[in-house]
Image (cartoon, rainbow, N blue to C red):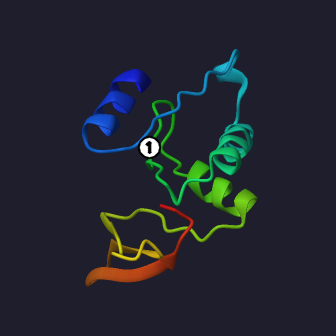
Amino acid sequence: RVKETLRSCLAMGADRAIHLLDAAPEAADSLTTARALAAVIKQEAPALALFGRQAIDDDMGSVGAQVAELLGWPCASWIMEEAVDEAGKAVRVGRQVEGGLEVFDLPLPAVV
């Protein structure tokens, strides 16, 4: 499923996709996964790191926030829409909250 998802991301315009393989994925907890991802993200230095809220084995949505903390980057979770500004300096995100849509800007680099 990972390769299929990465192909979809590339088809939608992502510049690159990196597939990290873990020899013992069942032994990795979310923090171990976040550390591995943060190391690659730090090396690759993207402006924006995108994470889902749901993995195949849980529904915690914690890895993105953990990666942001490890990198010292701003983070927005549970977002429904995002758009990078024309200058490439910030990302505007929106998430559903009680009573409407909360919209705010994060400086780049960021995790969403």
Specify the quadrant of the image occupied by residue 37: top right
The picture quadrant where one finds residue 46 is bottom right
Q: Residue at x 52, y 32 (%)?
A: 18
Observer-nearest residue: 10 or 63? 10
Identify the residue at horizontal 30%, vertical 63% (top origin): 80
Q: Which of 50 and 11 is in front in this view?
A: 11
| Residue 106 sits above or below residue 48 on the image | below
Q: Residues within 10 Å of mark 1 (few under 14, many from 20)?
A: few
Looking at the image, residue 25 sits to the left or right of residue 84; the answer is right
Tell me the SS state at disc 1. loop
Which residue matches tag 1? 54
Is 53 positioned to the left or the right of 66 in the image?
Answer: left
Which is more toward the observer, 107 or 103? 107
Q: Which residue is drawn at 48% across and 76% down?
A: 89
Picture quadrant of residue 68:
bottom right
Of residue 104 and residue 58, the one placed in the foreground of this image is: 104
Q: Position of residue 8 (x, y in %)?
A: 29, 33
